[in-house]
Each structure stands twice: as structure tokens, then as C-alpha cells.
Image (cartoon, grey):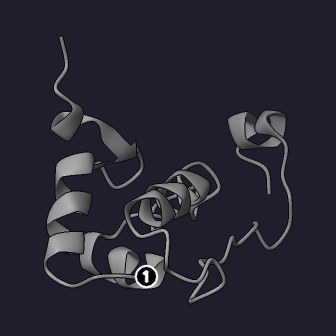
């Protein structure tokens, strides 16, 4: 059985719940500060997979925190591309 602390929050950067907890305990109290400390949301998906999970986790830990303080951005690709084009090596 997997321990909660080894639960991977950000798959792209392999950030675990334990790393998130550690960063929070060291004083990172906004999602942006957690991002800068752990690199969560900085991987290939740019937070499209883990951003909401991290923000939810943070506000459950600190209900008094403003939900609008330093929100993380989601950056879509400059130009969308299909998987078929990627497989063929086209751009």
C-alpha cells in the first residue's frame, strides 16, 4: 500500500505530497510560492493536470487564505497540434 506522503501530486516534475508538506512547513503559503519551491506545475503540462489539486490542497490546509492570492496560470501551447502530427514529426 502506498503511503500518502509518497503520493505524486505533479507527475511531470515528480513532486510528492511530502515535498508539498515540507515546502508549506518552510513558509510557502501561496500556490505560487509552492510552485517556486517544489517546481510543481512547471513540467510539460504547465499545470493543466496538477494546478487545481495543488490549489485545493493549499486552501484545505489554510481555509483563511484568500483563494485569489497568487493564482497559478495555465499556459496552453502556442499553437495546438494533433497527436497524429506529432507522430509523423510534423509541426
Q: Label 1 belongs to which residue?
A: 30
- Looking at the image, is 34 positioned above or below residue 5? below
Instruction: Give the x, y percent position of residue 42.
Output: 45, 69
Instruction: Give the x, y percent position of residue 77.
Output: 75, 67
- Looking at the image, is 49 positioned above or below residue 1? below
Which image quarter: residue 62? bottom left
Q: 15 or 27: nearer the eye? A: 27
User: Within 10 Å of the Cα at label 1, are there few (<14), some (14-19), or many (20+) other Cα atoms?
Assistant: many
Instruction: Give the x, y percent position of residue 83.
Output: 77, 36
Mark 1 lies on a secondary structure that is loop
Decide if residue 3 is on the left or right side of residue 30.
left
Extreme front residue here?
64
Q: Classify the position of the N terminus by image quarter.
A: top left
Q: 79 or 43: nearer the eye? A: 43
Name the residue: 65% across, 55% down: 48
Decide if residue 10 is on the left or right side of residue 45.
left
How many marks the image carries: the answer is 1
Q: 51 or 89: nearer the eye? A: 51
Amino acid at each position: 500500500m502506498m503511503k500518502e506522503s509518497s503520493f505524486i501530486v505533479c507527475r511531470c516534475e515528480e513532486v510528492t505530497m511530502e515535498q508539498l508538506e515540507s515546502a508549506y512547513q518552510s513558509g510557502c503559503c501561496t500556490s505560487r510560492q509552492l510552485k517556486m519551491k517544489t517546481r510543481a506545475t512547471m513540467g510539460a503540462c504547465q499545470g493543466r493536470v496538477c494546478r487545481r489539486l495543488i490549489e485545493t490542497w493549499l486552501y484545505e490546509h489554510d481555509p483563511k487564505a484568500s483563494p485569489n492570492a497568487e493564482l497559478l496560470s495555465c499556459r496552453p501551447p502556442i499553437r495546438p497540434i494533433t497527436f497524429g502530427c506529432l507522430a509523423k514529426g510534423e509541426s
